Amino acid sequence: MEDYKSYSQAIRMLRVSLVDQLENGIDFLLELLSSREVLNRDDREVVLGLPGPRAKVRKLLDIVECKGEEAARTFISIINQQQQKTHNLIPTEDSADQPQSKVCSKIMQKHKEVLSRRSESMLYYNTRHGEKIPFSEHYVNLLLVSGHQGLERKRHEVLTFGLKRLSMQQESTKHGQITPAKLFSSVAGSRPVKKVLVTGVAGIGKTMLVQKMLLDFGNNKDHLAFDFIIHLTFRDLNLITKPINLKELVLRKNRHLAKELDQILANDNKLLIILDGFDEFRHYRSCDIDAFVTEPDEDGEVAEVVASLMLGELLPNASVLLTSRPAAIGYIPVDCIDRFVLIAGFSMKEVQDFFQRYFQDHAFAKNMFEVVAANELMLTLCYIPAFCYIMCCILKESQDLAGESPKTMTDIYVQYLVALLRSHTQDRAKSSLNDQKEGASPQMSDVVLKLGQLAFLKLMDHQTLFYGSDQDVACLVGYGLVSTFLDKTVAQEPGCTEDIYSFTHLTVQEFFAAVYCAMTDHPLPDALQHKTSPGEETCKGHLDLFYRFLSGVLSERNANLLSRHIGLRCSREKVETYQKRIIGELRDQCGSGAQILNNLHCLFEQQDPSLAQAFELEGLRVNVSDEALSSMDYNAIKYFLNLTEGNISELDLTGTNINCEALKDLQPHLLRCERLWLGENNLDMNTVHVLADVLQLSECMTHLGIGWTDVSDEEMLVLSSAMRMSHMLQELCAIWNDLNDEDVEALTVSEGGSFVLRFTDDVVWEEWGRWVLARCEVSSNEKLVTVLCKVCNISIHCLEILWAKGFYKRLRQLIKNRIAQCTEDDMRRKLEKFENVLSS
């Protein structure tokens, strides 16, 4: 047979069709197969014992397939004899030479035409209703980085990913880059790549990548290893409220495949299924299932169908592409993923390309890019395509906007709001021109606040999708301004059509939420940090940008801009209340040494030097530890330190990935430090030389901590020389580094200064232990586990030392308390492992 290598394969490939065809005659078929001795009595009883005719057919097919080729041949012969149609359902040796390739080819071509037509135009952020923009005019190739690039979710995803982007782009040029056409290609000798997960932050281009793949397949350019690509979006799947099967899911938007769908699904090794937007799935937390769907026509909850596809229980030979924001990947069964791909966004060259395509004027686009390149904040965020669009909108209208170039995130988004409102106003009829001259109409400011209310309520509930049936959304329908900031898609379910809205980007929703909170009588949030307990893991930086936007909107310069152009006004009392709160929280944190970074960003958004008068502290302790710091973070830190005077009693940069350039930039402030902690950073020789300069010049530094920094003997010799010239340094803590005791003994320091290296120096280690415990008490469980991995990696005899007994006893009690409060099973197991280590 040409179509099938064997009769058993024919049964396997046409399994779906056979279930449909045989369910109504299963009892008669069992009699025939028993009379031909294909089935014995036990086989027949096993089949009859199952509930429902379709389950009986499936079991029958399993039994026949297991009995071998001769049984399969007899089965096919019986089936074809019973067919009353002109053509046999399953080809025999005589009929197998008449392939159905012509019919299949027509369906393939029809499907490709449909995909091409659906994908040729793109929704370009705030594209006006009915406006079509050719995909080729604005699509810019996005950088794909292969490998499992997990994002640590203790900060806002846009901020976290921004830290990793440049290094990933540099690495990708060497070995990690991958093109869309190669997503499912495998290296010779390795297992086939069947399941691919594509992740990326909001607005980075995941859906655009999918659209590009569909367009290229439809135009016969790429992905031709597949006969069919089925595209399903989780926005559509959200509308399904009753059990459904895969066949019904496919046909909802692909009715043209109805006649050949069984054959398409049976030939699943030539099928690619794209599941786009897992993070938008209402049931994304419910995909860890025990009940699987194994047949395309088997009904199940939509989460069960999706999970069965991902796990390979349903259509095991099919290829699956899943896209998701990092926020949801913890709920994906990653064990089934063959390839992890991260969209790293635009390189600088691609940002320039985007500007050229947007402005359609080479000289003007070049000039606008130079404006952005001169602003570090703007340039840093332009790796996100959606943000590139926001910047282009601002620059297009910036000639008429009074004020300085944006310095903060809020500055950028306020100008974006004003720019788009100005563009919307200019599109109105001539009869409204007088209103433009007088300022924004009351209706415009009212709609902005309604949008802000929607953004705020949904943000607090972790929602980024809003449905037309929602009362909060329904009240906005009819306002032309709404389409400027909300994207609209239409999801169709048989007998039901639902409008689905989302802000053009996650950060736009956060900004509108802040505007609403600032410009109405809605009370200010209770705390800027928005974290209830040290071990709590639920926040993950969810509201970081919201708080920064809120601070920026409540600043004098942005409040004036919003009042002048939009007619939005915040009360002076609210501004003063907020400023008192941020100063109070900063004063408390600087006194206690608590983590302070997000509050520093909120202060930076204010851009009000007069607030420095409130910082009169006897001991200034600045803790920005355990965060991989970006250039924007360093700007906020330097802004704050510039507002203060006198010595800094403690600056904690532990675990910040600080490098030589950043340390040089901070050098004027390092000279003010009494205690400087740089542990858990990779300090190379260049960085050590910067530290040595600080030691020689400082007139107040007494303690320097560089534990777990991978410094070697050579680096320590440099520091030793600097310590001999130091005016003040009393103690250098260099524990847990790659140092030899013999070499260390050769390092002598005059004037009583000391290296802390040995595990038996009780006095110094007791002080170190108190410091570690204090940090652990305010750390998240995630960070606590990181610390435990280091401090628990010791030999048993060390636990007998006096100071160690007390330290590890208190540490064990801290772990017990965290276990009792922990609600995450995986984290609890990690903590229990360390409890067992310390208890043994």
Image (spheres, rainbow, N blue to C red):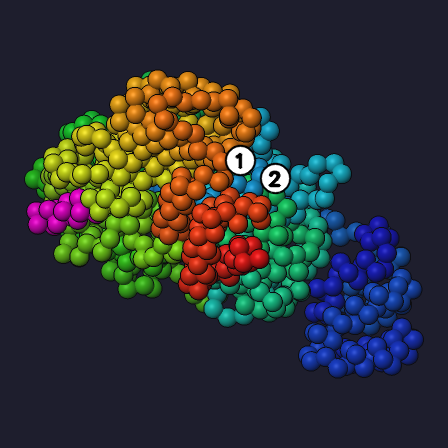
Q: Position of residue 656 (x, y in %)?
A: 40, 36
> 258 left or right of 755?
right
Tell whether position 582 is magenta. yes
* Labels 1 and 2 touching (C-beta < 8 A): yes
- Res. 128 mark: none
Q: Which residue is mark 1?
A: 144
Tell whether position 688 is magenta. no
Q: Which residue is mark 2?
A: 183
**Prevailing secondary structure class for the magenta stretch in the rendered image:** helix
SS class of the residue under badge 1? strand
> Which residue is found at the position 37% from the left and 40% from the top?
625
Q: Position of residue 457 (x, y in %)?
A: 28, 58
> 557 left or right of 474?
left
The magenta region covers 570-585
User: What is the C-alpha distance between the residues marked 1 and 2?
Assistant: 10 Å
Q: Position of residue 12 (x, y in %)?
A: 77, 60
Q: How many marks?
A: 2
Residue 45 can be seen in this image: yes
User: Hey, what amino acid is under mark 1?
Assistant: Leu
